[in-house]
Image (cartoon, rainbow, N blue to C red):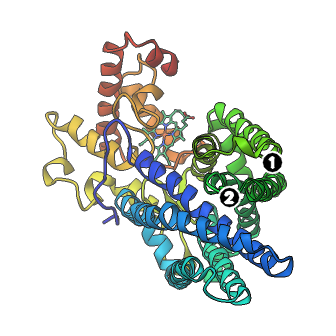
Amino acid sequence: MLGLYPVWYEPNIGSGWVIGFIATIHVLFSHASVGGAILFGWLANRAVRKNHPEYIDFIRRYGLFLLVFSYVLGSITGPGIWFSATIANPKGISALIHSFVWMWATEWVFFVIEVIGIYLLIYLAGRVDAKTHTRLSMIFALASVATLLVITGILSFMLMPGSPDWHQTGGVLTAFFGPNTFAQVALRIAFMLTITGVVGGIVAAKIEDPAEKSHIARVLSAVGLIGVAGTFLAGRWYFQTLPLSALETLTLRSPSTFSTMVAAAVGLSVLWFLLSAAKPGVLKVWTASFMTVAILVLGLAPEETAREIMRKPWIAGTYVYANQTIGRDVPALGIKSDLPLMEEKGVLATHPFIPEALRNPTDADRTEAGRVLALTLCANCHSLSDSGIRPLKRYFPAEADKEAVKRYLGAGLHRGLTSYMPAIPLPDLDRDALAQYIAELTRSADAASNDSDTQEAAR
Ligand code: HEC
């Protein structure tokens, strides 16, 4: 039997979009928090050394804001990613847990320190001497960066194991640490500073004393501009660590609007930082909130989506495909590829959750069997309805009949000839059912194609 789970299918949206939506918001909250922590560490030191007691007050205000913005909302969306990703791809999450359970445990320890730290920073501001407050700020900053490091190592493993021979050798650290891990940590820290410069504006806007407000505004602008410059440099480093296949998938398959969006995010942030440093009067709760949303939509959303796209066809460790099949042997973990069994016996025969009646479909239920196969094998990346992620019906020409689709399934898809799609080798019985379903799906698209968009995509 293949180790496959039932599929979570979200018609019209696709499970990927659900996770993506939750994750992008979560990244904003968590980045604002870690960036804020780094800023607090620095400010607290300056507060003592250069005698700036107003910095402590700003840390208290910003900390209170982060407590709700990052900690409450972040703690809701964080488990949200877990829940949605676990239902969407139990095998992918399982692969990560099997390698990294102690890494996650480590992260939770640091996270607990962070949560306690933020409360202490807020409630002890002005109540303990400045030196003690500085120490707390430093602990908070280090714990925050530690959580970032742990999560980034795991994210990086999702793209590829740290060491290229990890599949043979195994080992947590070789899975975790690779050139991409460090470049991604640098990139995220730099981007966090940009986010901190922007989100901090929401708090700074409320400072009444004009001199203090303009001073803090300039600090935030400097932090933000350092962040932008750092993002640019770390971004170049990051791209150098990507494997060729990821770069290829990224260039071929990411929407052309992405680079424009990111350029707009950078341009807008630089303008914003210069303007708010020169004229702190522009710093209002609504302008800073608007900039926060702009960074989220123009910067974070395309960045996180691109990271998803370039990982295709894998979901984790270059051995679990996005459709949950194991695409290669991992001798170090005693894991065997699903593909030989899939090719020989087929998915209808070996998927534990296929209804018995569909295992050997008759003419009457062949299309239904094909639909179950499409749900299992394709729906993680292609929605089966008209909208959502890469609707499957748009990828076959309207005139493709069952035989033509079947030939495609037996050729390109069988061996995985593209860099972005998994190899899906199926025996004749499965191919026949899937082809019949796809041909009917495409025909139904054809019948409904007053929609010029559909026709264009089909071409
Ligand atoms: C790992 C994700 C993934 C899975 C699983 C997947 N595809 Fe794809 N597929 C893609 C991507 C990405 C593209 C490129 C789409 C684009 O650029 O718009 C694609 C493109 C295609 C194309 C266009 C031709 C081509 O080769 O580029 C066809 C046809 C197709 N997929 C069929 C299928 C079928 C049928 C299944 C299930 C048996 C399937 N795909 C499963 C990711 C996937």
At label 1, counting other C-alpha atoms closer than 10 Å, the crowd grade (few under 14, some 14-19, many 20 or more) is many
Horizontal arrangement in the rendering, residue 195 relative to residue 367 (left or right): right
Residue type, numbered disc 2: Thr
Mark 1 CB near ligand 1 (8 Å cut): no
Question: In the image, 87: left or right of 329?
Answer: left
> Which residue in the protein does label 2 denote?
196
Q: Is residue 133 above or below residue 367?
A: below
Q: How many marks?
A: 2
Relative to 384, say whether 381 is above or below: below
Q: Mark 2 or 1 closer to N-term? A: 2
Q: Residue 20 at what x, y percent from top left?
A: 48, 50
The answer to whether residue 350 shows anywhere in this view is: yes
- Residue located at (64% from left, 64% from top): 160
Is residue 57 found left or right of 14 in the rendered image?
A: right
Where is residue 227? Give x, y as percent: 78, 56
Q: Is mark 2 within 8 Å of ligand 1?
A: no
Local secondary structure at mark 1: helix
CB under 8 Å between callouts 2 and 1?
A: no
Question: Distance of mark 2 from mark 1, alpha carbons?
Answer: 15 Å
Q: Name the image quarter holding residue 168.
A: bottom right
User: What amino acid is labelled 1 in the image?
Assistant: Ala
Residue 277's tag is 1
428 relative to 39, above or below: above
Q: Residues within 10 Å of mark 2 (few under 14, many from 20)?
A: many
Quarter holding residue 128: bottom right
Closer-to-camera residue (358/233): 233
- Give percent across and percent down for residue 105: 50, 84
